[in-house]
Image (cartoon, rainbow, N blue to C red):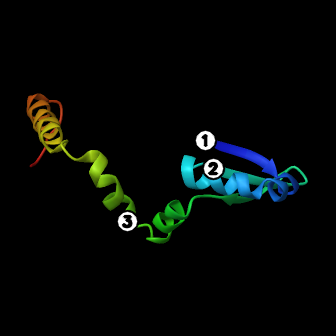
Amino acid sequence: MNETITITKAKARLSEIINRLVYQKSKIVLTKNGKRVAVILPFETYQNLQKGPGQGLILAKKSLSGLDREIDEMCDLIYREREKERSREVSF
């Protein structure tokens, strides 16, 4: 759950906000004079962001596990359809 609140409200509700970050994995957007100026997020999320751009695929790997067969089938289908196509020369 993401919520947008003013810095003034965040100061008054800091303990509540910390609990929501820890237990609900919420993200809080802070505003000042109606403009977004900062985000408060769970430490675990922050650590994942610090791993760098190359870690995105590694972190996503678990969610993609088990798709190897489907991807292979999709590639085979693409190659079969390309072989049927006669309007242009295709080299493999």
Label pair 1/2, CB-CB below 8 angstroms: yes
Q: Secondary structure at mark 1?
A: loop
Label pair 1/3, CB-CB below 8 angstroms: no
Q: Residues within 10 Å of mark 3 (few under 14, many from 20)?
A: few
Question: Which one is in front in this view, the residue at disc 1 or the one at disc 3?
Answer: 1
- Residue type at numbered disc 2: Arg
Q: Nearer the viewer, residue 6 or 16?
A: 16
Is residue 15 toward the left or the right of residue 71 in the image? Answer: right
- Farthest residue in the right direction? 33
In the image, what residue occupies the spot 50% across and 65% down?
49
Q: Nearer the viewer, residue 38 or 41?
A: 41
Q: Which residue is mark 1?
A: 1
Quarter-of-image position of residue 80:
top left
- Residue type at numbered disc 3: Gln
Q: Residues within 10 Å of mark 2 (few under 14, many from 20)?
A: some
CA gap, disc 3 and disc 2:
26 Å
In the image, what residue occupies the spot 76% across and 58% down?
14
Q: Secondary structure at mark 3?
A: helix
Q: Picture coordinates of residue 30 (x, y %)?
A: 77, 55
CA gap, disc 1 and disc 2:
9 Å
In the image, what residue occupies the spot 79% across and 48% down?
5
Q: Which mark is residue 18?
A: none
CA gap, disc 1 and disc 3:
24 Å
Q: Which residue is mark 3?
A: 55
Chain-order first, disc 3 or disc 2: 2
Question: Which one is in front in this view, the residue at disc 1 or the one at disc 2?
Answer: 2
Q: Secondary structure at mark 2?
A: helix
- Residue type at numbered disc 1: Met
Quarter-of-image position of residue 59:
bottom left
Quick check: 26 above or below 37?
Answer: above
Q: Which residue is mark 2?
A: 20
Quick check: 31 above or below 84?
Answer: below
